[in-house]
Image (cartoon, rainbow, N blue to C red):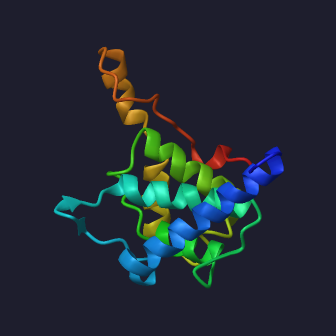
């Protein structure tokens, strides 16, 4: 029985690590996301969710998942972000993940990325093109997150 917030936190972190490790072993060889899974396209949202989950595990003190350093896994996942397909809520998740690594120009999670990969990340964290839809009364499920790279926390 869990009796303290600390015990609950430990159990949640342990359970999350176990689920992520099991998923990585079974479905994500080399931390590569499949193009399809169970007949469904694996979109940018899945990559954003996995990055966000790993980011929070790192914030909780987890340094390795499945025998790999969390930051190394994040760098691999971030290298394959599709900027145009990442928007609204998932822009936020990529931005939060990247913010953990510092300002964009000197971000440790993007240090090994090519200029093109960095441009994809810049596009991924900018959902300003959704503002017109909001102004027109369309609500895509969340407020667009717009984090210009120059304004990231450092």
Viewer-nearest residue: 5 or 145: 5
131 vs 105, left or right, is: left
- Residue 35 percent across, percent down from the top left: 25, 69
Residue 137, picture quadrant: top left
Q: Is residue 101 above or below residue 28?
A: above
State whether residue 73 is above or below residue 41.
Answer: below
Of residue 93 and residue 114, the one placed in the foreground of this image is: 93
Residue 99 image point, x, y percent:
66, 53
- Left or right? Give the position of 128 relative to 138: right
How many badges with numbers are in the image?
A: 0
Identify the residue at horizontal 34%, vertical 22% (top origin). 139
The answer to whether residue 45 shows anywhere in this view is yes
Residue 114 seen in the current view: no
> Residue shown at 29%/20% (left/top)?
138
**In-front residue for pair 98/147:** 98
Height in image: 22 above or below 129? Answer: below
Residue at (22%, 66%) from the top-left corner? 36
Q: Position of residue 17 (x, y in %)?
A: 60, 67
Q: Is residue 54 above or below residue 31?
A: above
Q: Residue at x 43, y 34 (%)?
A: 128
Residue 141 rendering spot, x and y as whole percentages: 38, 29
């Amino acid at each position: 029985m869990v009796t303290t917030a600390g015990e609950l936190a430990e159990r949640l972190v342990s359970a999350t690590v176990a689920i992520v490790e099991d998923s990585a072993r079974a479905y994500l060889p080399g931390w590569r996301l499949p193009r399809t899974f169970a007949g469904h396209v694996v979109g940018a949202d899945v990559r954003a969710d996995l990055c966000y989950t790993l980011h929070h595990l790192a914030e909780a003190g987890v340094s390795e998942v499945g025998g790999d350093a969390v930051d190394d896994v994040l760098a691999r996942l971030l290298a394959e972000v599709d900027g145009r397909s990442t928007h609204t809520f998932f822009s936020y998740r990529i931005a939060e993940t990247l913010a953990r690594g510092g300002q964009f120009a000197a971000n440790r999670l993007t240090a090994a990325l090519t200029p093109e990969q960095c441009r994809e990340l810049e596009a991924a964290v900018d959902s300003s093109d959704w503002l017109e839809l909001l102004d027109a009364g369309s609500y895509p499920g969340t407020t667009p997150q717009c984090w210009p790279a120059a304004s990231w926390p450092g």
